Amino acid sequence: MPNNSTSTITTTIKVDPAIWNFFGPVPSADKFWKGRDAFEKALTKTMAAKDDAQFEELWKTFSGIATKNGANDQTLKEINDYFLKSNEGMLP
């Protein structure tokens, strides 16, 4: 915008929404991150499935691993709650 600098039109928040900002403070996100090796290996196999039937089978395994490791509605709620609390008063 003409005659405006970034510093006059932006708001700095304390915790940005990047997933790695939640690994320490949100235990369920930290658990998910620590289990990423199994998660990533299962995802790689799923994406390389030879056909739809194998994809569906591998997807179930991948989804189970992800959920068990913390990729679930409760973890998302905890991440969102932490984000909102950390940035209280800075977001509309």
Image (cartoon, rainbow, N blue to C red):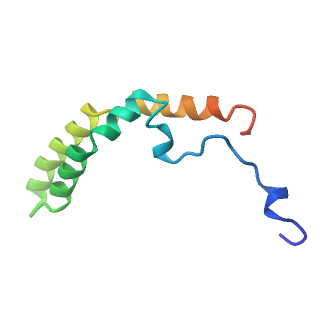
Q: Is residue 73 visible?
A: no
Residue 52 percent coordinates (x, y)? 13, 58
Q: Residue furthest bottom?
A: 2
Residue 58 percent coordinates (x, y)? 13, 49
Residue 23 percent coordinates (x, y)? 43, 37
**The N terminus sits in image quarter:** bottom right
Relative to 67, does residue 57 appear above or below in the rendering? below
Q: Quadrant of residue 92?
A: top right
Relative to 58, does residue 50 appear above or below in the rendering? below
Looking at the image, which residue is at 48% across and 29% down? Answer: 77
Q: Residue furthest front?
A: 24
Q: Residue furthest right?
A: 3
Left or right position of 36 against 18: left
Which of 43 and 26 lies nearest the eye of the viewer? 26
Looking at the image, which residue is at 23% across and 41% down? Answer: 63
Q: Quadrant of residue 76?
A: top left
Residue 35 percent coordinates (x, y)? 26, 39
Looking at the image, which residue is at 87% across and 72% down? Answer: 2
Q: Is residue 37 visible?
A: yes
Looking at the image, which residue is at 70% across and 31% down? Answer: 88
Total label count? Answer: 0
Left or right position of 88 against 38: right
